[in-house]
Image (cartoon, helix red, strand yellow):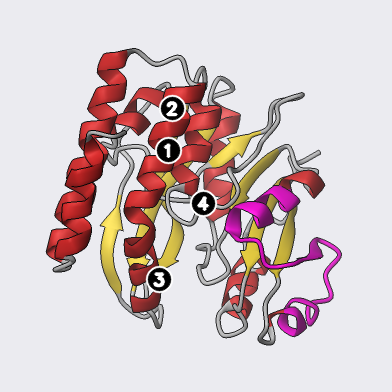
Amino acid sequence: MDNLISIVTPCYNSASYLADCVNSVLEQNYDHWELLLINDGSNDQTEEVMRSYDDIRIRYFNQDHGGVSEARNLGFNNMTGDFFCFLDADDVLPINSLESRLSIFKQNPEVTFVDGVVHIMDEKMQNVTKVWKPSFIGDPFTDLIQLTGKSFFGPTWMVKREEGKNYLFKEGLNHGEDLLFYLSIATGGCYTATQDLIYKYRKGNESAMMDLNGLWKGYKLIYNELKQNYDMDLVSLRAFKNRITGIAFKTYLRHFEIKASLKVLQEYSSL
């Protein structure tokens, strides 16, 4: 029997984009999947769009608005697949996204995580503004904390489920939740990637500003999690601290957020 792939999709005020998202799953050339749509307390027509699909592979859940991490955790609690991946409600999967990643698992039984090429699209999903290509093989933990960008773009990994393993996002985090989650499951795993296009990411002005506002707060939370809950040597921990400080400082400067950039430097020593 073919392996079942669980696709976890949080939906918050996603009515304008959700049909494109769901249709991209329905059009996959690999059809043994379940799509878990989690309505995260939307106040637009998201739920109506969700329930307009009559396919037993699509499952619906509702929760009060709690954020993407809480929604994904609800998906984890209800998924039944042998593998799982994420799809944000404003993004789409190319037609071979599931099959391409699953084929890597079948060829390499030791592999735990499979990624692939990502196209960053404009808000109308018409033009490619940037291409991200993974370039790492092996245990991804060290690469993730070094923030090289070789094994991490965003919610694009397909993960082989391990029996008895607890998959959990840190709730209340609006920036860096993907990175922290992957760090929590990375150690001892094996990451690789297909060179096929597996994800189309919609980048709009609103989402860019939301990312910017939460940037330093998210990085600080990840740093504190690593410091308190991971057995990391001081050299690696300090290197991560220096890296996130540099990224946040330069990012705020590029966007002329002078006060925010100065706040990063002020708070560096207290981390």
Could you tell me how far apart the alpha carbons at marks 1 and 3 are, in whole angstroms?
A: 20 Å
Q: Earlier in the sequence, mark 2 or mark 3?
A: 3
**Nearest the camera: 247 or 26?**
247
Residue identified by numbered label 1:
222
Which residue occupies 48% across, 39% down?
180
Magenta stretch holds residue 259: no
Task: Give residue 229's position: percent from left, percent from top.
Answer: 51, 23
Label disc, if present, on residue 173 of the rendered structure? 4
Q: Are marks 1 and 2 in contact (CB under 8 Å)?
A: yes
Could you tell me how far apart the alpha carbons at marks 1 and 2 are, in whole angstroms?
A: 6 Å
Which amino acid, by three-letter code, is at mark 2? Leu
Q: Which of marks 1 and 3 is nearer the N terminus?
A: 3
Which amino acid, by three-letter code, is at mark 3? Ser
Label disc, if present, on residue 136 of the rendered structure? none
The crowd level at tag 3 (other Cα within 10 Å; few <14, some 14-19, many 20+) is few
Residue identified by numbered label 3:
207
